[in-house]
Image (tube, grey):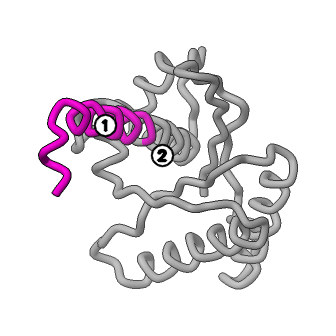
Amino acid sequence: MGYGIVIIRGQAMELMQFGVIHLSKYEGHELKLKKIFERVISLLDEYKPDEVALEAPFFGKNVQSMLKLGRAQGVAMAAALSREIPIVEYAPKKVKQAVTGNGNASKEQVAKMLMTLLKIRELPKLLDATDALAVALCHHFQKGMAKETAKSWESFLKQHPDRLR
């Protein structure tokens, strides 16, 4: 399971930390879920983020994999909620579209774009980490679009006060 932490100052984006929570050494799904919870809590306590963005569950062919992924995402959500941090979810295609301009981009294409955007020198070996960073940047880009949309509506309504009915 990947994670990525960025800091945003105005329009400037800075990479704080990213990585993968390694779970293969743990026996049993319940121990893996416990490890996810503990690691996410430690990241939240260390970096104190304002918000948490997650990749929304997607429908795959393997039902067991989907179930395990959903549980892992739920545990990450529970960790954020325990610290009263707001959560936002983005569909995988939306993340890829926001970062690369192509909703069908490969993990490698997403990683290469992140290298440019966040000045990462070397392509990470584990692309789950760059996937997580992509979700964080998607959230930043979406918030920017929301602000621009709000400004546009505000301007429109000032120019057309008759439309307020």
Residue 60: percent from left, percent from top? 30, 71
N-term mark: 2 or 1: 2
Query: Left or right of 57: which side holds 52?
Result: right
In the image, residue 35 above or below residue 11? below
Identified at 34% across, 33% down, the residue is: 151
Describe the element under mark 1 as helix, strand or loop.
Answer: helix
Magenta span: helix, strand or loop, mainly?
A: helix
Q: To which residue does mark 2 refer?
A: 135
Identified at 45% across, 31% down, the residue is: 111
Quarter of the picture holding the N terminus:
bottom right
Q: What residue type is labelled 1?
A: Glu
Span of residues in magenta: 143-165
153 drawn magenta: yes
141 drawn magenta: no
Quarter of the picture holding the C terminus:
bottom left
Residue 154's mark? 1
In the image, residue 148 above or below residue 90? above
Q: Which amino acid does label 2 sit on?
A: Val
Residue 21: percent from left, percent from top? 70, 55
Identified at 67% across, 31% down, the residue is: 7
Query: Left or right of 128: which side holds 26?
Result: right
Identified at 69% across, 61% down, the residue is: 85
